[in-house]
Image (cartoon, rainbow, N blue to C red):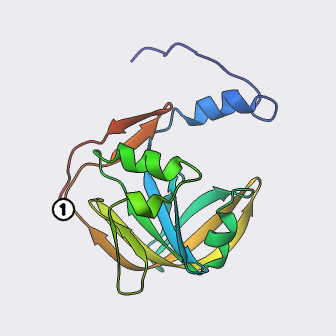
Amino acid sequence: MSARELIEEGDAATDGRGFRRCLGQFATGVTVMTTRHEGQYVGMAVNSFAALSLEPPLVLWSIRRHSAMAPAFAQAGRFVVNVLASDQADVAELFATPGIDKFAVAQWRKDADDDAILNCTIATMACELDRVLDGGDHLILIGRVRHFARYDGEPLLFSQGRYAAGIGPLRS
């Protein structure tokens, strides 16, 4: 294998845009986090989701500390991870758009605990908020998974500022 051509390099502390482009080289899955806070459903597109532990079953994600939705997710006590399928880029865009009632547009249902579950996803994880940690300009939310569901389908990926289809459906 030959060396790859250098595109850019720099000091992450002084070149935030360049650092962000560097982070964009890492392909991530796309999720929509949902919760209910003070009687209102809220949701947002997130690609900072990761598995943390199997025993106990923990996941994590982060939200900008100054996001209008940060108080809702930090105080609600629970959230749902909705893992989007490759044909749901429009859902990701909907939940990335501020100022609209996403739940008036999206296809979704309530689970037995009144949590918002998006339709046609490839996985969902209903979580109790375990703790919130300081992550610089973000809050890191750790959730204890209390229920999960997995469906056929390909994941929606995000890399270099674009959506892409996943690697194909996997079954095990």
User: Measured along the vertical axis of the image, is residue 156 above or below residue 40?
Assistant: above
Tell me the quadrant of the picture where the C terminus can be found. bottom left
Along the line of sight, which residue is nearer the eye, 58 or 100?
Answer: 100
Q: Is residue 171 left or right of residue 112?
A: left
Q: Quadrant of residue 14?
A: top right
* Quarter in which the N terminus is drawn: top left
Amino acid carrying label 1: it is Ser
Q: Is 8 in front, or is 3? A: 8
Residue that mark 1 sits on: 172
Q: Determine the image quadrant of residue 87.
A: top left
Q: Residue at x 50, y 38 (%)?
A: 26
- Give the residue at x 35% y 80%: 111
Residue furthest out toward the bottom: 112
Rendered location of residue 66, percent (x, y): 75, 56
User: Could you say where residue 81 lies in the image, as x and y percent from the top left?
Assistant: 44, 66
In the depicted view, which residue is nearer to us: 135 or 35? 35
Residue 32 appears in which quarter of the rendering?
A: bottom left
For image coordinates 35% across by 36% down, the residue present is 164
- Quick check: 168 above or below 21? below
* Depth check, front residue: 76 or 38: 38
Instruction: Examine the rendering and report whether any part of residue 29 can be seen.
Output: no
- How dense is the environment of label 1, judged by Cα within 10 Å: few (below 14), some, or many (20 and up)? few
Q: Position of residue 25 (x, y in %)?
A: 51, 32
| Residue 28, position as x, y percentages in the image | 45, 45
Image check: 33 left or right of 141? left
Q: Secondary structure at mark 1?
A: loop
Can residue 80 be seen by looking at this rendering?
yes
Q: How many marks?
A: 1
Point out the residue furthest to the right here. 14
**Residue, x 21% and y 44% (percent of image)?**
168
106 vs 169, left or right, is: right
